[in-house]
Image: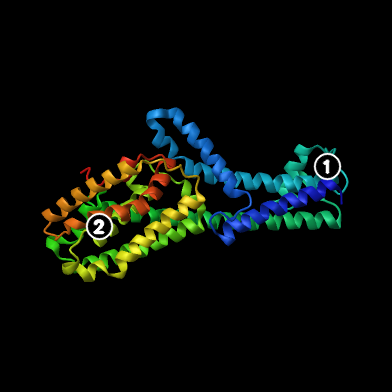
């Protein structure tokens, strides 16, 4: 075996391992090539979207589908190039056309390799030795297997994307389209009655856990950005985190102790932090350059606005809860602030507290 063929086999193995880690092992950040390729394509597409200025959001919403297409093309090109390096030394000898003169250039090798990854002996060239027959058979099995795996993977990605969007829309509807956690809490507790709030939050926790795991299993979800801000992961996570924070710090503990200490409230906060943390660790997020003083002032204004909204809804509020609210909010807000700008959203689109 020639050095060129060894390099070709190694290249094919590298791409097959990358496909295995991305599709079958399915853990965020575990691929050998795909994570870096996807990030590079995201940066390139994001820079291109900025050229559209006012249509920046709409242009960037194409990035997710384009990255899917580019990733498939990247894998296909890598496997084809590797197979071509293996096949080229055999052209005109063990791999010949059924009629006519045999060419031995690399473009012909790419053509033969591409066809051998889909159908044995396609393109007019066929193997004429035991070794090349086995090579063509292996190539066809690799091509068919990779195609099936990738198609199945894409079905799962888009299914997870639909579930994520359904959760985001549900959260937005529960805030009456305001994106304000205080409004959501007021609707969950009409007249101060928390009897049904626990079960409703429990349903949200299940969807939130599924969304978090989907981003862990299918990192391509990171790159699907929608023009409507309420679909943003940073926004739905911020609303749920602010909701849990308000429940734990603002509600009268003596009156709502059972609700405040319930598992869904704790799970909602932890689940949203885990979701933002997954994106923060595995996505090229922005640096957090916020001013601590302005953060405190904004949190204080948010609490005052929320307390007013809850009081109007007949919900007993603790005025002294503002200090605990500010401390709790500063624990998770930087996560949202790092994720949101990278996906092309401004913080006033993500954090709608007190804006309605």
Q: Which numbered tag is attached to residue 204? A: none
Q: Position of residue 283 (x, y in %)?
A: 50, 48
How many marks can you see? 2
Q: Nearer the viewer, mark 2 or mark 1?
A: 2
The answer to whether residue 178 is seen in the rendering is no
| Residue matched to label 2 | 246
User: Where, quadrant-wise, is the C terminus in this rendering?
Assistant: top left
The scheme the figure's colours follow is rainbow
Work out how far the residue at label 2 is from the one at label 1, CA to CA, in angstroms: 78 Å
> Do the numbered discs 2 and 1 sit on residues whose CB atoms are within 8 Å?
no
For mark 1, does the 10 Å Cα neighbourhood hold few (<14), some (14 to 19), or many (20 or more) residues?
few
| Residue matched to label 1 | 99
Residue at (45%, 31%) from the top-left corner? 50
Up-down: is 151 above or below 77? below
Q: Quadrant of residue 204?
A: bottom left
Secondary structure category for the residue under label 1 = loop
Q: Earlier in the sequence, mark 2 or mark 1?
A: 1
Residue at (19%, 57%) from the top-left corner? 320
Up-down: is 271 above or below 42? below
Q: Position of residue 70 (x, y in %)?
A: 57, 43
Q: Position of residue 234 (x, y in %)?
A: 37, 49
Residue at (31%, 67%) from the top-left corner? 264
Q: Quadrant of residue 21?
A: bottom right
Q: Is residue 268 left or right of residue 253?
A: right
């Amino acid at each position: 075996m020639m050095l060129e063929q060894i390099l070709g086999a190694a290249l094919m193995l590298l791409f097959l391992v990358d496909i295995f880690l991305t599709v079958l092992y399915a853990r965020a950040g575990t691929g050998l090539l795909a994570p870096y390729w996807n990030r590079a394509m995201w940066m390139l597409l994001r820079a291109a979207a900025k050229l559209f200025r006012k249509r920046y959001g709409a242009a960037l919403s194409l990035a997710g589908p384009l990255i899917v297409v580019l990733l498939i093309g990247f894998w296909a090109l890598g496997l084809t190039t590797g197979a071509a390096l293996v096949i080229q030394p055999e052209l005109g000898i063990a791999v010949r056309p059924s009629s006519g003169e045999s060419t031995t250039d690399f473009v012909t090798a790419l053509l033969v390799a591409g066809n051998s990854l889909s159908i044995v002996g396609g393109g007019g060239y066929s193997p004429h030795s035991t070794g090349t027959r086995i090579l063509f058979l292996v190539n066809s099995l690799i091509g068919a297997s990779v195609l099936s795996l990738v198609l199945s993977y894409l079905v799962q990605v888009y299914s997870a994307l639909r579930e994520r969007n359904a959760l985001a829309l549900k959260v937005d509807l529960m805030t009456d389209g305001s994106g304000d956690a205080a409004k959501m809490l007021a609707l969950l507790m009409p007249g101060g009655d928390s009897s049904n709030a626990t079960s409703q939050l429990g349903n949200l926790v299940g969807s939130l856990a599924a969304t978090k795991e989907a981003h862990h299993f299918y990192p391509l979800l990171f790159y699907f950005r929608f023009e409507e801000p309420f679909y943003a992961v940073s926004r739905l996570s911020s609303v749920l985190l602010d909701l849990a924070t308000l429940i734990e710090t603002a509600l009268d503990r003596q009156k709502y102790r059972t609700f405040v200490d319930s598992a869904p409230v704790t799970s909602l906060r932890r689940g949203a932090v885990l979701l933002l943390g997954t994106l923060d660790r595995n996505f090229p997020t922005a640096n957090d350059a916020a001013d601590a003083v302005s953060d405190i002032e904004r949190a204080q204004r948010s609490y005052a606005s929320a307390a007013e909204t809850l009081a109007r809804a007949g919900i007993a509020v603790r005025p002294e809860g503002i200090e605990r609210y500010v401390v709790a909010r500063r624990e998770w807000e930087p996560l949202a602030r790092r994720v949101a700008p990278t996906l092309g959203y401004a913080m006033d689109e993500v954090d709608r507290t007190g804006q309605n």
